[in-house]
């Protein structure tokens, strides 16, 4: 019977042995992990002596290095699959991989916008899936066991890493508290990066199966119980709810809402993952054998409901990147289910292999999400412009009749979509050099605001009144009105007050004196520019008050909330949202 000391020594030896195995088998990957952690620590401590935004270049570098982790793993398992490859070819492939990452840094990750992030996620997904597929391609056995084993190993590894980090963080925190050591909070993030980004991957990689370390074909009992008796019944219950909803659609003849497509898609993706995980149990468990045989058939009609909901949305608003990815994910699930139904001896490796291919194809080429979305939104824009007389001989002209508000919003949303994600030059009908500032001059109506800053916004601000000052002591005030983004139209005994949130215009129409018109957005900009502290959100009542007076009335604006952004290229202030009170004091009308 071994003592505690001997067991502790044996445990330490096993950890060192696993670390040595990882260093010997995956030195390139661990080197990339270490480099990524070093860059993240530098970013954490504010090291960035470049001229761009603080941390911009280090963030891009860390992202590209992190992309090198699945890339190096894929190359390594490919070499293990082809042991006869010459050393020169291996060096050439590693060099090509390093060159590809360098080009990716300079040309495909120039900024963190929607396109760059979605492309990065798709490439990462494709590379990680490729890493799992390459060793088992054209093999029929053990892929599912290998993936389940890696999943369990990953969870255990990061559970140990979390415990280790928690213990070390507790020690540092105690030292900091008892001895006033003034340990920076950044040290705790550094500690997690080292534990989670270097040591945890090193121990996890040691569990990856190889020729010397064959796959253990045991299935974790806890996972089997979880999937068989909890997940599968939940999936079937969810399926019943969706089928009842589909029956309701047939009875009411009302097309499903867009939210339904997301509900069905996530349900279908989780169901596909469960199918993949329980597939090895189908021979020993009759319940699971029935589930894997019939559930793909059960899922297909629900996917039709999903595509119907998506079709309504795409028909109305065209394709965007988000809708494209949802559509492609739905097509992949549908193809996977058809494969499982039709194939006599389906191979589960088809699912991750096809997903890796779909992820790669979705972000490159003329069929990519970006190219298809640009074409779709151009077509939608031209269709709307032609319908309302805004497009003649391929050029934008001012309409002869007023354009409805809803159509103005649609046109504005398309213009803002291109401005934020692709550049206005990709919108074919616009003249060369067009900017959003010239919207009214070109179209005859102003750009309808859309919440959230564009891609070149330097800063987004949100100012609001201190709630403790949300009271008034009124004297000599005739009227108090509240205005917000929903738009208001007040009729009083003395005037009408109309506020349009689209252009922040306030009109007060009098029957017996001159009307009053003011752009409240301009007043909000004045208050923002005059505020001595720009980075404070909560302001006093005095800081949010503006008084205007003329011969007929005195107006006092008190802003409850101001949202907007500053354009990085020009310094222009754009107001998105306003909520304000208006105190009106009428002066006696002059006779004659």
Image (cartoon, helix red, strand yellow):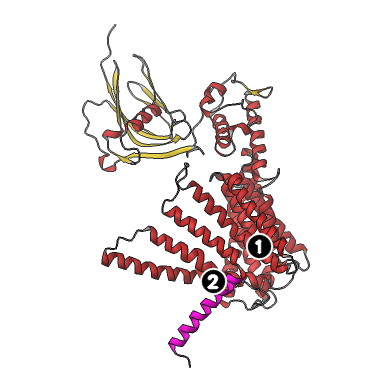
Residue most extreme to the top: 592
Q: Is residue 20 magenta-colored?
A: yes
Residue 203: image tag: 2
Upstream in the sequence, badge 1 or badge 2?
1
Identify the element where label 2 is drawn. helix
Residue most extreme to the front: 88
Which of these two is toward me, 281 or 366? 366
- To which quarter of the image does residue 286 belong? bottom right
Q: In percent of the image, x 59 and y 45: which residue is there? A: 106
Q: In percent of the image, x 50 and y 84: which residue is there? A: 10
What x and y, as percent, mark residue 287?
65, 74
Is residue 297 at all visible to an observer of this figure?
Answer: no
- Determine the main secondary structure of the stretch shown in magenta: helix
Q: In percent of the image, x 57 and y 68: which residue is there? A: 231
- To which quarter of the image does residue 338 belong? bottom right
Is residue 175 at all visible to an observer of this figure?
Answer: yes
Q: Is residue 506 magenta-colored?
A: no
Task: Left or right? Give the position of 547 relative to 358.
Answer: left
- Number of disc labels: 2
Quarter containing the C terminus: top left
Residue 74: image tag: 1
């Amino acid at each position: 019977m071994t003592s505690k000391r001997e067991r502790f020594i044996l445990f330490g030896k096993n950890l060192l042995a696993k670390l040595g195995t990882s260093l010997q088998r995956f030195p390139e990957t661990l080197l990339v992990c270490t480099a990524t952690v070093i860059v993240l620590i530098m970013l954490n401590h504010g090291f960035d002596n470049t001229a761009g935004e603080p941390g911009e270049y280090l963030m891009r570098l860390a992202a590209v290095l992190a992309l090198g982790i699945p890339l190096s793993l894929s190359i390594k398992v490919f070499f293990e699959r082809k042991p006869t490859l010459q050393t020169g070819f291996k060096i050439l492939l590693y060099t090509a991989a390093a060159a590809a990452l360098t080009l990716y840094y300079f040309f495909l990750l120039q900024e963190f916008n929607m396109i760059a992030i979605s492309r990065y996620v798709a490439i990462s997904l494709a590379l990680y899936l490729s890493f799992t597929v390459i060793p088992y391609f054209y093999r029929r056995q053990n892929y599912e066991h290998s993936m389940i084993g890696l999943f369990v190993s990953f969870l255990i590894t990061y559970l140990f890493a979390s415990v280790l980090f928690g213990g070390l963080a507790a020690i540092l925190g105690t030292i900091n508290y008892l001895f006033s050591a003034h340990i920076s909070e950044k040290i705790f993030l550094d500690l997690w990066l080292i534990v989670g980004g270097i040591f945890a991957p090193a121990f996890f990689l040691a569990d990856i199966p190889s020729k010397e370390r064959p796959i253990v074909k045991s299935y974790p009992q806890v996972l089997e119980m979880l999937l068989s008796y909890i997940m599968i019944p939940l999936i079937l219950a969810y399926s019943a709810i969706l089928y009842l909803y589909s029956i309701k659609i047939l009875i009411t003849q009302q097309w499903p809402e867009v939210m339904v497509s997301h509900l069905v898609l996530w349900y279908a993706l989780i169901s596909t993952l469960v199918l993949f995980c329980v597939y090895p149990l189908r021979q020993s468990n009759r319940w699971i054998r029935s589930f894997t045989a019939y559930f793909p058939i059960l899922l297909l009609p629900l996917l039709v409901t999903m595509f119907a909901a998506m079709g309504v949305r795409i028909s109305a608003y065209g394709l965007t990147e988000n809708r494209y990815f949802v559509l492609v994910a739905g097509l992949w699930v549908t193809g996977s289910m058809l494969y499982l139904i039709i194939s006599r001896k389906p191979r589960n490796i088809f699912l991750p292999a096809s997903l890796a291919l779909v992820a790669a194809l979705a972000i490159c080429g003329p069929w990519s999400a970006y190219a298809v979305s640009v074409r779709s939104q151009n077509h939608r824009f031209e269709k709307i412009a032609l319908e309302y007389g805004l497009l003649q001989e391929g050029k934008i002209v001012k309409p002869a009749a007023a354009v409805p508000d809803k159509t103005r919003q649609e046109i504005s949303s398309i213009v803002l979509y291109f401005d934020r994600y692709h550049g206005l030059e990709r919108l074919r009908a616009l003249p060369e050099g067009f900017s959003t500032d010239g919207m009214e001059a070109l179209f005859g109506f102003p750009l309808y605001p859309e919440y959230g800053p564009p891609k070149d916004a330097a800063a987004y601000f949100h100012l609001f009144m201190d709630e403790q000052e949300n009271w008034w002591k009124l004297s000599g005030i005739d009227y108090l009105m509240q205005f917000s983004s929903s738009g208001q139209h007040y009729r009083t005994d003395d005037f009408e007050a109309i506020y349009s949130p689209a252009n922040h215009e306030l009109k007060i129409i009098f029957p017996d004196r001159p009307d009053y018109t003011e752009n409240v957005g301009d007043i909000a900009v004045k208050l923002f520019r005059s505020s001595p502290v720009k980075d404070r959100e909560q302001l006093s009542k005095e800081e949010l008050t503006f008084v205007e007076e003329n011969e007929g009335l005195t107006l006092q604006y008190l802003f409850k909330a101001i949202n907007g952004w500053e354009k990085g290229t020009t310094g222009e202030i754009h107001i998105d949202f306003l909520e304000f009170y208006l105190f009106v004091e009428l002066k006696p009308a002059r006779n004659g």
